[in-house]
Every structure is written in structure tokens, then in C-alpha cells.
Image (tube, rainbow, N blue to C red):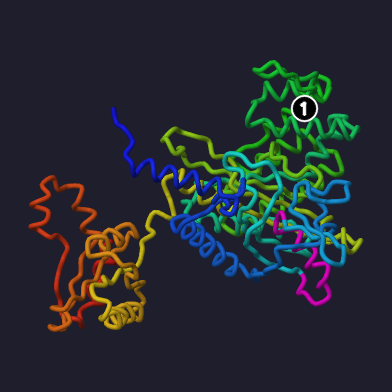
């Protein structure tokens, strides 16, 4: 039986005193907000740099807007109440106007476009990335603050603008680390769905919404489950009953035929869709738009393995007005315990021609694509392509003697001048703790400049990358100390070259 020591009791008492002291706040992160260390930060920066490069090559300019927008300008998540803080984080300014942290990057774009439309090039092509905030209940993988990355074209009603966004999104995802063909962008058109409603004889708005919600569950419930939701309703495994759309059997089968029209070949899909909804004015318009998107994607070299027509895609029922698209990860993925999981959507977008009109009263066509940066990083990690796995710390210059700090800083400056990250240890510990510190930083190497080295004009370099690789193979600690792997003493002038060899081999 292990009894607590006096030191354990003292530490426990100290912790209790700290937490009970009203003058000492408890160190805790707010719910739904997370702290991220270098591995995750560097991974997401790499994604943003790669995707931004793609967007700029396609002629899109960067735009930054403020974190806060006036609450009435956001126009979403806002209840009919004095304090508009459901869904967003809001505060009242000293002029009594309500401001809220942006919940996405598109609403600020609409405000910016409306405010500066006369001076903007038209169409206006911009990309943006940054944090967004949502005042919602947090849960596993669901945070109140996260980063998004968007690209949008405002001012073009041409279907080719949708095609360009789709092709650019495919290239951006691949630049971020996904191999070609490992993500599929599924495309539909809201006008097709409206045409389907006409063909199925659905005119009631509530019934339309019920049909679309049923179609949106196709991936999860399959055709049989959706058939029940299109009819009288469905009882799930728990016994809960969901009321259905109330369609006749013939109308329900027509909807299911529409959802089953997706095929690898985009032209073949269009032909099947025409058989189901052809003759409806709005449906025919949607078919024509998809045909133009198909032609543009073909010209851009984007085949059906990267972008396909999928009639079951339903997004933003009250938001999108034309083409809609969703990127699905096709790679096999596993969770933290190694169990296979279906990752699903990693981004999406579509045409939203009514958003700028909230400010101007005039319909302004717009289309765009957005993905969550953290979600894409998680997708890459789950697929075994973690963009943060190569994160390494700086070269650490060991500090032996306080009177020699200027010499150590000179060494670090020389290393940094060569473009290699470096730091001087600024703690008060001895040699062994300093080496442990460098190892915890995942430093590639430690540089030792003692009295002997200073007198001889040399430096000693310990290759920590090699040491970590060999450590797992050494069973005899005595032999380990005797061999001193990866350690070399060289002339000071060869320092940078030696460090570059270590970095290149890492």
C-alpha cells in the first residue's frame, strides 16, 4: 500500500488553498474555446499558405474585414429580442448600436461589397481567412471559435463563375495536402430541386421543406429511410417518430428517382435528371446552368473523379439560390484510437444571389466556397497526412556561464542569419536539464560552446534528431554514454554547414 508523503500532503494543501482563495481565479479555458500549440498552429498555417497561393494564382485578391459587424448587418442567428445574443456574441456600443462577432466570412463580404460597390472592380473576386465565432452549445468537435477560409466572386451570374470556384476549390484542397481524387466535390442546383417539387406536385412551402430535409438525410438513412420520410413518417431505433412530408407513393418515387440520378459521368447525370424534371421552367434553367458548369469544368481539366453532379446535395435551404456544392473526403480515415470513421464533408458553398440585396435592394449575383481550416487539418490527420507532424523546434545554444552570455547570443545570431531558427537557453538549469529542454522542444540539434570550444575556436554539435532515432534501439545505457552518438566538435566556421546537414537529413 502506497501512503502519501508529507510533500504530497503539502502540495495538495497548497492546491486547495489556491482554489479556495477568492483572490486567485481558476485557470480554465471557456467552454467551446481551445488552446493550440505549435503542432496544430503550424499545420493550419501551412494549409492557409498553400490554399492562399492557389487563390492568388487564380486572380483572387485577399480581403480582411473586422471581427465585429453591426448585428443588423449579419442578419442571421438573431432573435426578435432586445439583446441579439442567440447564435452570436453581441455587445452594445456606446452609441447604443449592437455589434456582434462575425459568425462567418460571407456576411462581412456582403456588407463590404454593398458599402464599396461603386469603387470595386466588377466582378469582385476575393479570398479571406480568419476566425469566426458562434454562440452555440459546444460539443465534441464543435467549437465556438474556429477558422474559415473562403473564396467568392461577387457580380457574375454566369454559371462559369460557379465552375471556376469549384475547380479552384479542388485545386486548393489538393494544395493543402489531399492527393488528386481523394476529395469529391458534389454539385447540385437549387433550381433543380424547385423543378422537382413542381414535377412532384408539391406546392405547399412546409411540405417542400419536409421533402428537402428528407432528401438531405439520404446518406445517413438510405433510400428506404428517405422513402418513409417522404410519406407518412419514420420511427427511429429509439422509438421517436418523425412526421413525413405526406407525398403520394408516385410522388415519393419520383423524388427518389431524382436522388438516384447521380452518375460518375456528368453528362449522363444531366440526361437522367432531364427525364425526371424536364418540362419545368425552373428545372430546365437549372439543367442549362449545370450543362454550362460541366463544359467549363471540362475545359479546366476537372473530371468527374474530382467534381460530379449529385442531386441529393441540399445546402442552406433559405440561403442558396442556384448551384450548390459540397466537398466530401474519400480517403480512409481513422479516429484517435485507430478505428475507421467516415469523415464526410470538408467544405462547401454555392450561389447566393440575394445576400448583397439585403443592403442595396438590388439582386447582386455571388458564388463562393468555404472550408473550416481546423476541420481540414483534422481530415488530413485522420487520413494519415498530418501537416503538423514535421514541426520541429529551434537549434538550442547551451548556456554554461552567465559571464559568457554575449558569446552564446553571438552564436545564435550567426545561426539565425543563415535562416535557421535558434535560441539561447535562458533558464537557470545545468547541462542535463538544458539538453532535456532541447529534446522537449523537438530541436534538431544543440550547440555547445564551453571554455574549451571558445579557446580553440570550435563548437560542439549534438545531433538530437539522430539521438532520438538511435535511443529506441539502445538497451545498454553504459554503451549509450560511451558511444555518444551524433556528437561532433568542429571549427566554428563550419557550424552553419553542419547544422544544415542535420536539418536536411531530418
Residue occupying image coordinates x 12% and y 49%: 477
Residue occupying image coordinates x 73% and y 22%: 227
Q: Please state which of residues 472 and 311 is positioned toward the viewer in this rendering.
A: 472
Q: Please state which of residues 302 and 355 is positioned toward the viewer in this rendering.
A: 355
| Up/down of 458 relative to 327, above or below | below
Tell me which segment is drawn in magenta: 103-122
Question: Is residue 75 shown to the viewer in this render?
Answer: yes
Question: Is residue 175 shown to the viewer in this render?
Answer: no
Q: Quadrant of the C terminus?
A: bottom left
Which picture quadrant has residue 264? top right
Relative to 449, is 229 on the left or the right? right
Residue that numbered label 1 is attached to:
254
Relative to 393, is 233 on the left or the right? right
Relative to 253, is 416 on the left or the right? left
Q: Quadrant of the N terminus?
A: top left
- The spot of residue 325 in percent (x, y) is 67, 47
Amino acid at each position: 500500500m502506497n501512503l502519501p508523503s508529507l510533500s504530497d500532503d503539502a502540495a495538495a494543501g497548497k492546491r486547495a488553498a489556491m482554489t479556495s482563495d477568492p483572490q486567485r481565479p481558476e485557470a480554465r479555458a471557456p467552454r467551446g474555446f481551445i488552446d493550440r500549440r505549435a503542432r496544430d498552429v503550424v499545420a493550419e498555417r501551412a494549409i492557409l499558405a498553400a490554399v492562399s497561393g492557389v487563390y492568388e494564382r487564380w486572380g483572387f485578391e485577399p480581403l480582411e474585414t473586422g471581427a465585429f459587424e453591426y448585428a443588423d448587418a449579419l442578419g442571421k442567428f438573431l432573435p426578435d429580442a432586445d439583446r441579439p445574443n442567440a447564435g452570436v456574441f453581441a455587445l452594445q456600443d456606446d452609441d447604443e448600436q449592437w455589434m456582434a462577432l462575425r459568425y462567418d466570412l460571407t456576411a462581412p463580404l456582403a456588407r463590404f461589397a454593398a458599402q464599396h460597390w461603386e469603387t470595386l472592380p466588377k466582378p469582385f473576386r476575393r479570398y479571406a481567412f480568419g476566425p469566426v465565432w458562434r454562440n452555440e452549445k459546444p460539443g465534441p468537435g464543435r467549437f465556438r471559435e474556429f477558422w474559415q477560409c473562403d473564396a467568392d466572386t461577387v457580380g457574375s451570374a454566369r454559371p462559369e463563375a460557379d465552375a471556376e470556384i469549384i475547380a479552384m476549390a479542388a485545386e486548393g484542397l489538393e494544395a493543402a495536402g489531399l492527393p488528386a481524387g481523394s476529395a469529391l466535390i458534389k454539385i447540385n442546383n437549387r433550381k433543380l430541386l424547385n423543378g422537382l417539387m413542381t414535377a412532384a406536385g408539391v406546392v405547399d412551402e412546409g411540405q417542400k421543406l419536409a421533402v428537402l430535409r428528407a432528401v438531405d438525410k439520404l446518406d445517413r438513412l438510405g433510400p428506404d429511410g428517405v422513402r418513409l420520410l417522404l410519406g407518412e413518417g419514420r420511427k427511429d431505433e429509439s422509438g421517436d417518430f418523425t412526421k413525413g412530408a405526406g407525398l403520394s407513393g408516385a410522388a415519393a418515387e419520383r423524388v427518389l428517382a431524382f436522388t438516384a440520378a447521380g452518375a460518375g459521368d456528368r453528362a449522363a447525370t444531366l440526361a437522367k435528371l432531364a427525364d425526371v424534371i424536364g418540362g419545368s421552367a425552373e428545372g430546365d434553367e437549372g439543367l442549362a446552368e449545370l450543362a454550362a458548369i460541366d463544359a467549363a469544368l471540362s475545359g479546366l481539366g476537372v473530371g468527374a473523379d474530382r467534381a460530379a453532379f449529385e442531386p441529393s446535395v441540399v445546402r442552406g435551404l433559405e440561403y442558396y439560390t442556384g448551384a450548390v456544392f459540397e466537398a466530401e473526403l474519400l480517403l480512409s480515415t481513422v479516429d484517435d484510437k485507430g478505428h475507421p470513421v467516415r469523415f464526410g464533408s470538408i467544405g462547401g458553398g454555392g450561389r447566393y444571389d440575394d445576400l448583397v440585396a439585403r443592403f442595396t435592394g438590388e439582386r447582386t449575383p455571388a458564388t463562393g466556397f468555404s472550408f473550416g481550416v481546423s476541420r481540414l487539418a483534422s481530415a488530413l490527420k485522420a487520413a494519415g497526412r498530418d501537416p503538423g507532424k514535421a514541426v520541429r523546434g529551434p537549434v538550442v545554444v547551451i548556456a554554461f556561464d552567465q559571464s559568457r552570455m554575449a558569446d552564446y547570443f553571438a552564436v545564435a545570431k550567426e545561426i539565425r542569419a543563415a535562416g535557421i531558427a535558434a535560441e539561447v537557453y535562458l533558464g537557470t538549469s545545468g547541462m542535463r536539464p538544458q539538453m532535456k529542454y532541447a529534446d522537449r522542444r523537438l530541436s534538431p540539434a544543440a550547440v555547445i560552446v564551453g571554455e574549451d570550444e571558445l579557446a580553440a575556436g570550435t563548437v560542439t554539435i549534438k545531433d538530437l534528431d539522430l539521438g532520438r532515432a538511435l535511443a529506441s534501439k539502445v538497451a545498454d545505457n553504459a554503451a549509450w554514454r560511451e558511444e555518444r552518438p551524433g556528437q561532433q566538435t568542429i571549427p566554428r566556421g563550419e557550424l552553419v554547414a553542419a547544422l544544415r546537414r542535420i536539418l536536411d537529413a531530418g
